[in-house]
Image: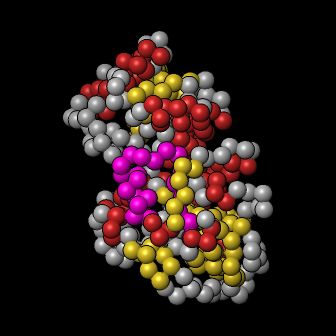
Amino acid sequence: MHKILMSRTGGPEVLEWIECADPVPRAGEVVIRTHASAVGWPEVLVRTGAYKWMRPLPLTPGNELTGHIEAVGPGVTTLAVGQPVYLAVREVDYACGTYSEKVVVPAVSVLPLTAGDDLDAFAGLGYFVFAWALLHEMAHGHPVERVLILGAAGGTGSALVQTARYEGKPMIIGTVSGEEKASFARALGAHHLINYRTEDVFARVLELTGGEGVDLILDPIVGARFSESFKLLRRWGSVVSYNATGGMPGADLFPAMRSRADHGVGLRCFSMHIYEGDPQGRRRIREPAVAMLRSGVKPRISRSLPMSQAAEAHRILERGQNMGRMLLKPARSG
């Protein structure tokens, strides 16, 4: 078999396609032959060494996959050879990565799928789990009718748009970098798109909401203008930061929050790592996402590359050229 291995951090060139021995399951374990592995920004952060929760090197990147059971170890009775499955590496404490033709994991960590489940769609299940958590676990029980999604055409952003539309949010506003991405996000269900390169996002949000603002801002960017976000919140509104690709906010952050004290605004920082050691919490946020995919919601898959081209997949992400989901597949899967 083959897999991607990185022995050092750096540019995409550190992602090496190597040949290695096939895994053999021990008692309680199964071998999964990969159908597809999703590609996302966390793997880019791992590759560059910027990820806060880095595992020791060398490592194989990748956080989720779909595939079929190829072999079962002694004592495994809940899974059978040939069965379609989903794996999130969070369930195995990141003991493996999914940029690999095969993985061996404990059987209890695997989510069984049905013959009717789309394995390409379920390879990006984690994005919808993440989106559901952002929309439901961060709002502190206050109603969310108006949501602003920054980067609405990306992997997480597009899942947020689809999840918000699935739940019938009456106003979904997204930011994008151009008309192609605006058309893409609009087709997923966004009501209003703002080109942040040519428009003033803050002025446009206030215009679209009649000066009232939104209930929830989902922000993976932060950056110098982050403190202005509080001006865009209605009563009890919150900003949720789930990355900071644009850098840290300025020293005016707390004064900006205090200036909106009469609106009870909030700020939360979110990471899926909050669910480590919390299997019940992980199930709680996964089950609605599984139901959503089985109801007919389909992630938009913009590219499906051979797994050996993981470096090119990372270049596409870093150039901002990706829309929706991007997958890596062993060559035999197409």
Q: Farthest residue toward the top?
A: 210
Quarter of the image with the N terminus is bottom right
In-image side of 273 versus 115 (left or right)? left
Name the residue located 40 percent from the left edge and 53 percent from the top edge: 316
Looking at the image, which residue is at 69% across and 82% down? 71
The structure residue drawn at horizontal position 56% and vertical position 86%, both measured from the top left corner, is 22
Q: Nearer the viewer, residue 281 or 169?
A: 169
Vertical position of residue 77 compared to residue 232: above or below: below
Q: Is residue 325 magenta?
A: yes
Q: Quadrant of the C terminus?
A: bottom right
Residue at position x 44%, y 65% in the image: 310
Q: Specify the segment rendered in magenta.
A: 310-330
Q: Is residue 277 shown to the viewer in this render?
A: no
Q: Looking at this view, is 257 or 10 the one in front?
A: 10
Query: At which x and y percent is residue 313?
Result: 44, 59
Residue 205 is covered by the magenta coloring: no
Name the foreground residue: 86 vs 13.
13
Q: Position of residue 29 (x, y in %)?
A: 64, 80
- Chosen colour scheme: secondary structure
- From the top left corner, tell me how far across and down residue 31 is, in percent: 63, 79
Does residue 318 show up? yes
Question: Residue 17 is drawn in which quadrant?
Answer: bottom left
Using the image as rendered, state which of residue 105 and residue 332 is in the foreground. 332
